[in-house]
Amino acid sequence: MVYIYLFLFIIVLLLLYMRFEAGRVKLERVKFSKNYNGLKIIQLSDIHMKYLRVAEEKTKSIIEAEKPDIIIITGDYIDTPHQIEDFLKFLDKIIDNIPTYLCMGNHDHKAFKNTTILEPNEKLKHLKAAAKLKAQYPKNHKYKNGCKTEGGCDINNNFNDIEDIKNNFNKNNLYTNISNADLEALQVNSMEKFIRVLESKKNVRVLNNDAVCVVKNSKKYNIIGIDDLNTGNPCIEKALSACDKSADINIAFSHNPDIIFKIPKGSVDYLFCGHFHGGQIWMPFNLEYTILRKEKLCKMGISKGLHKLNGIILYINRGLGNVCFPLRFLSRPEITVFYMP
């Protein structure tokens, strides 16, 4: 009996430590240059609002102290559309006036895959949330970067337009007095609308198979965003075609590091990713990757940190948040600072 109590005590201590570690962010510095005259980038990844345990104030204080030129966030922000408002508040708190570029992760895409008409008893809750989000929509914002308008993406969205929603509601005698404005706000359960809401924020841009050129000290850097490899609609050719051909360095970012096997050799100098969480909970013999992961890089023993592959310098961020539960073990949350040449 004593051994049982001792075992349970150790388990409780371990769980408490894992909960503690999930909130202890570590700042990693990656210096690609000996001087600090080049572009300074902060990377965040795998925010996972539901199980985020790193205090927003801590993230904000690190960013303010580091004073990066740009921020790159490499996917996995939400698991359901209901978490959008929390993520928008997170962005408001941390980015200030820093240009911030995002790509989408597998959890973000899955959040909109199986959306359904709301049940009557959820009417009030969702309309209140919609009213808050409605203020975020620019009136005449043209959606440029996503794949839906390009004809190459199926987000399985049941709310195709205002009339479809209204017909569904009327057919089921739901919300017969709901206004068109409220219905429009409810369309936030699509990837297209999510991107539009994000891009309505000052200094935020979603690079969904797109690129921008950033200049510092007369040096040009292409910042190239590629959609998620497995659940998105990645189009590397489209992203590269948006690059400034006169740029000195091409920096790509995407959620799943396995995208590196799809990128043409010589087209990208650096690739920043996330997705693996550094294992999140360490297990001996890399069991967390053997059991839970199917990605090619994991099978090669590449799951976090700095590597060079296919002629590309790859960095895999351990992520800020957590999946399944708010616990980590020997894989602290990470904010990465890159000093570019």
Image (tube, rainbow, N blue to C red):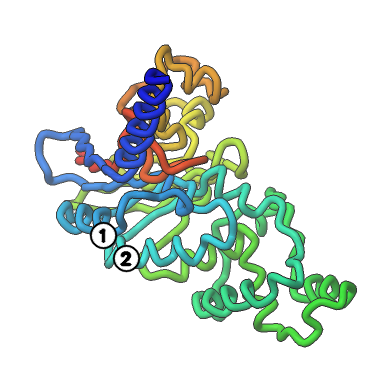
Viewer-proximal residue among 246 and 298: 298
- Residue 263 lies, with reference to residue 73, above or below; the image says above
Q: In the visual, does 331 lie left or right of 51?
A: left
Residue at 49 percent of width and 21 percent of height = 289
Asked if marks 1 and 2 touch (Cβ < 8 Å), the reply is yes
Give the label, 1 or 2, closer to the camera.
1
Question: As drawn, is 274 to the left or to the right of 144?
Answer: left
Quick one: label 1 or label 2, which is nearer the N terminus?
A: 1
Residue 4 image position (x, y, % from top left): 43, 21
Q: CA distance from mark 1 to mark 2?
A: 8 Å
How far from the left and from the top, in percent, is residue 130? 59, 75
Give the structural element (helix, strand or loop) at label 2: helix
Residue 259 visible? The answer is yes
Q: Residues within 10 Å of mark 1 (few under 14, many from 20)?
A: few
Kindly state the secondary structure of the residue where label 1 is placed: helix
Indicate which disc residue 57 carries: 1
| 184 over 67 or under it: above or below | below
Amino acid of disc 2 = Lys
Residue under pointer 2: 93
Residue closest to the eye, 1 or 102: 1
Residue 59 image-quadrant placement = bottom left
Of all residues, the one furthest to the front in this rendering is 1
Instruction: Check the image and name the residue furthest to the right.
Output: 171
Query: 109 or 24: which is nearer to us?
Result: 24
